[in-house]
Amino acid sequence: MNAHHPLHPTDPAILYLSRREITELIVELRTEGREFGILWPSAAPGEADIAGQRLISLGNVPASTVINLLAVLREFKRGRDGGRGAR
């Protein structure tokens, strides 16, 4: 995951993410994003894969959106904190 090289919604690597892994990403996004007002309390792994995209119920956005948003948040925090406390 890298903010400078975002994943495409149809990236084959996303299809290998389990429902549990997607749930963990959502939990991480809730935790990391809270400071920035990114709140999606109803987010959950989607029930379907559509056109090769793993979906998350936020209005059915691709899982790549959550992954890329986390990457941007991490990159911002790393820059803001001078590398301290970044994952």
Image (cartoon, grey):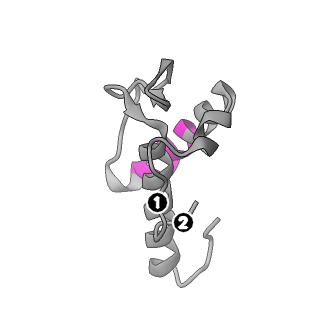
Location of residue 60 in the rendering, given as x and y in whole percent from the top left corner: 36, 26
Q: To which quarter of the image does residue 41 belong? A: top left
Q: Is residue 70 magenta?
A: no
Q: Nearer the viewer, residue 51 or 71?
A: 51
For the residues labelled 2 and 1, say whether their Cβ atoms are less than 8 Å apart. Answer: yes
Q: To which quarter of the image does residue 21 belong? A: top right
Type of secondary structure dominating the magenta stretch: helix
| SS of the residue under disc 1 | loop
For the point 31% across and 26% down, which residue is it? 59
For the point 49% across and 54% down, which residue is it? 7
In the picture, the quarter occupied by the N terminus is: bottom right
Location of residue 37 in the rendering, given as x and y in whole percent from the top left corner: 31, 49
Q: In the image, is residue 28 above or below residue 78?
A: above
Location of residue 87 in the rendering, given as x and y in whole percent from the top left corner: 65, 65
Q: Nearer the viewer, residue 39 or 57?
A: 57
Identify the residue position indicated by label 2 in the image. 2
Q: Identify the amino acid type marked 2.
A: Asn
Q: Identify the amino acid type marked 1.
A: Pro
Q: In the image, is residue 32 above or below residue 44?
A: below
| SS of the residue under disc 2 | loop
For the point 37% across and 33% down, which residue is it? 61
Q: Is residue 9 left or right of residue 18?
A: left
Query: What label does residue 6 carry, if any?
Result: 1
Q: In the image, is residue 67 above or below residue 75?
A: above
How busy is the neighbourhood of tag 1: few (under 14 within 10 Å), some, or many (20 plus)? some
User: Of all residues shown, which one is farthest toward the bottom?
Assistant: 82
Alpha carbon distance from label 2 to label 1: 6 Å
Location of residue 64 in the rendering, given as x and y in whole percent from the top left corner: 47, 45
> Range of the magenta residues?
26-34
